Amino acid sequence: MGLHWGAGPLQALLPEEQWSRIQSVQVDPNEPTAEQDALNFLNGQSGEAMASIPARYFYRLRRRKLRALMEQGLDIRYGKRLQNIQYSADGKHATAIFEDGSSIVARIIVGADGARSTTRRVLLGPSRGEVRRLPYCATFVQAQYSAERARYLRQFHPLYIAGINPAGYFSFLGLHDATDRERPETWTFFFYISWHSSLQEQRETAGWGNAQRLAQVKKFAKTYTDPWKSAFEWLPDDQQVWYMGLSDFDPRDPSHRWDNHGGRVTLAGDAAHAMTYQRGQGLNHSITDAANLVEAVRRIVSGEATQADAIKEYEDEMIARAGSEVGLSTVNTAMLHDWHKVLQSPVMTSGMQRSTEIKAN
């Protein structure tokens, strides 16, 4: 996951000792995060440099390791699946009811359960709480190579590089794990190709197996130059891939406004604002949600604000900020897959700035 402008809020959330170990959860813990770096975009067919997007302290974090770092000292109970939420008559509590019959009573329930959030569907209903499917999809790969091939792929950039193919494809290649610096054959690379795909086409290919998905994306990769051409060409025929359609959820839509029951339930992260990933904003907004929610809870506990007012203020700011990014990221995705509009896309014109900063400029 990419963390850049959200690094400040994350640092504020973590005890100093935990933040001091942020380097250990990066894809390459041996490579200190550069104060000034850039995400380079290449023409996927010719290899010509198209743009270099400045990035200050662009952390590339492994999800599993980041979760392990942040969960220390917390009471976490895995394996629970939310079924429903009930609210006390006195307006003070909410009860999360799980599929296994257990329940937890709390002053506030925060649904931070991802883009396919069950909490969101409980609050809005199964129809209004669904993400909006978009006419774009992608196939992802994680793979290891021989030491020689691994060193070759990494020479294009030690951590990440993006490619835009005039044929209508967008691609990314990055490092997923390089814990052992001296053994390139143990490095894992993460890469994908995304493309425009109508919802009808997505339905028609819904039953495809791994072999068909791999053959399809390897065919797309033949139109590429390196590093993507070789990265895909070198994959074995039984390589596992992950295919998924793109989607979004804009909390600014009036039909998406949930009842927070006097501040007793709210949403955060992808559950509140699922967005496409080609502008690398999701984690940064999710961490900002967490920081702002902590501040809201502090105001409640200190008596500075009522729970209803504090959570409403949190939601109003979050919906405006992250909702703006949902819209901008979806526009960005569409433009990156249209060769005639690529250079006008938000990531090309404004880089990875917050959407609110883009509007202010």
Image: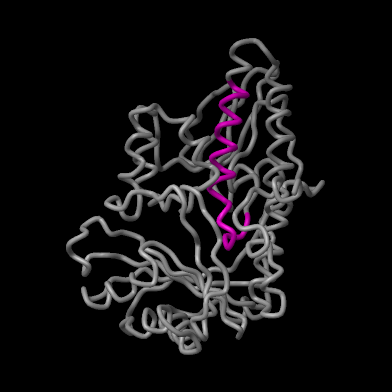
Residue 260 placement, left or right of 95: right
Residue 326 placement, left or right of 112: right
| 103 drawn magenta | no
Classified by dominant secondary structure, the portion drawn in magenta counts as: helix
Residue 321 image position (x, y, % from top left): 70, 43
Residue at the image point whose x is 69% and y is 15% from the top: 305
Residue 308 image position (x, y, % from top left): 72, 22
Question: Which residue reaches farthest left?
Answer: 182
Nearer to the camera, 162 or 276: 162
Quadrant in which residue 236 is drawn: bottom left
Residue at the image point whose x is 36% and y is 60% from the top: 176
Nearer to the camera, 224 or 212: 224
Start and end of the magenta stretch?
A: 275-297
Residue 357 image position (x, y, % from top left): 69, 46
Vertically, is 351 above or below 196?
above
Vertically, is 352 above or below 139?
above
Quadrant in which residue 204 is drawn: bottom right
Residue at the image point whose x is 51% and y is 27% from the top: 104
| 296 drawn magenta | yes
Residue 248 placement, left or right of 214: right
Question: Which residue reaches farthest front?
Answer: 36
Residue 340 image position (x, y, % from top left): 71, 80
